[in-house]
Structure formats: structure tokens, C-alpha cells
Amino acid sequence: MAWTAPKVDWTAADGVADTHLNAIGENLLYIKVSHMDLTTGIHGAVSAATPLALMARDAYGRAKVVAPSAEDDIAIKATVTTEGTARTDADTALQAQITALGTGPFLPIAGGTMTGGAVGHVDVDYTTARFRNVIFGTVAPTTEGNNGDVYMMYEV
């Protein structure tokens, strides 16, 4: 079956003959069989990543594309896998930091017990609320201490 060139020089005196209708029917059948019913080799379509060629799926339903270079390009599996791995690694690192904070050396707002010494910031700014170093002893201090320190002496 081949394409038949259609009549293009119609005039008002021309009638539509059986041969004209048959030619139209044969051309429609040619289009159906040679284009619409095809599943492979359609207009040079290929499953490989080929520039300026139509994309077709291979026997397994896959088609190849190259790595994306713009935000709206098709992503390939390697790009998605790399992004997914990067996000998983970042989430793991962040979770480790959160866990470390949760078990770190701090007093919760609701209170707690300090297991070591605490030293306040030393300066002479008495207009700002601060934690001050409070020192307790049973004898008078032998050294002066720092600005802002509070010394309390008690009897045993």
C-alpha cells in the first residue's frame, strides 16, 4: 500500500467519481497503518538520548535523557538519587546535632541539678541582669576575686 497523490485541481464541473473516493479511502488507510498503528520506528524516534529526535520507549518502557542543566529539565535517576542522598545525609547530621543538644550540658528551663561548677561572666556592667559568681567559704578570702563576684562567709 502506498500513498496516492490526491486530486488537487478540482473545478465546479468535476464530479466525485468512485476512483476519487477510493483514493481518499486508500490514503486514510495508509495513514492509519503507516503512522497511527506503528509502535516502533515512528518518524525516527529513538529511546537513546539523541538531540533533536523524538523520544520513544525501549522494549522495557524506558527512555534515556541527559542530566538536567535547567530547573525545568527532565531529571534522570542519578540526579534524583544524588539529591535524595544529600538530603538524607543532611537530615542525619541535623538529627545528630539535635540529639547532642538534648543530652548536652545544660539546665532545662524547668530546673535541674548542676554536676559541675558554674562561672559567671566577669565585668563591671552592673546595669544588665547577669549571673554573678557566688563564692561560699568559712574564712575570709585571701584574694580579692573579680568584679561582680559575691563572697559569702559562714560559720561551721
Image: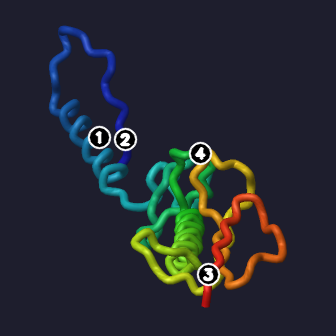
Q: Badge 2: how crowded within 10 Å, few (<14), some, or many (20+)? A: some
Q: Position of residue 57 (x, y in %)?
A: 45, 63
Marks 4, 3: nearer the viewer: 3
In percent of the image, x 43 and y 61: which residue is there? 40
**Mark 4 crowd level (few <14, some 14–19, many ≥20, 10 Å Cα):** few
Q: Secondary structure at mark 2?
A: loop
3 vs 62, left or right, is left
Mark 3 or mark 2, whichever is nearer to me: 3
- Give the label on residue 3, or none: 2
Q: Residue at x 74, y 55 (%)?
A: 123
In the figure, residue 25 lies in which quadrant? Answer: top left
According to the image, label 3 marks what residue? 154
**Residue underneath mark 4:** 70
The answer for how far apart the CA atoms under marks 3 and 2 are is 114 Å
Judge by depth and name the residue closer to the eye, 110 or 52: 110
Measured in 3D between alpha carbons, the distance from the residue under mark 1 to the one under mark 4, in whole angstroms, is 43 Å
**Residue in the image at 79% along x and 68% along y:** 145
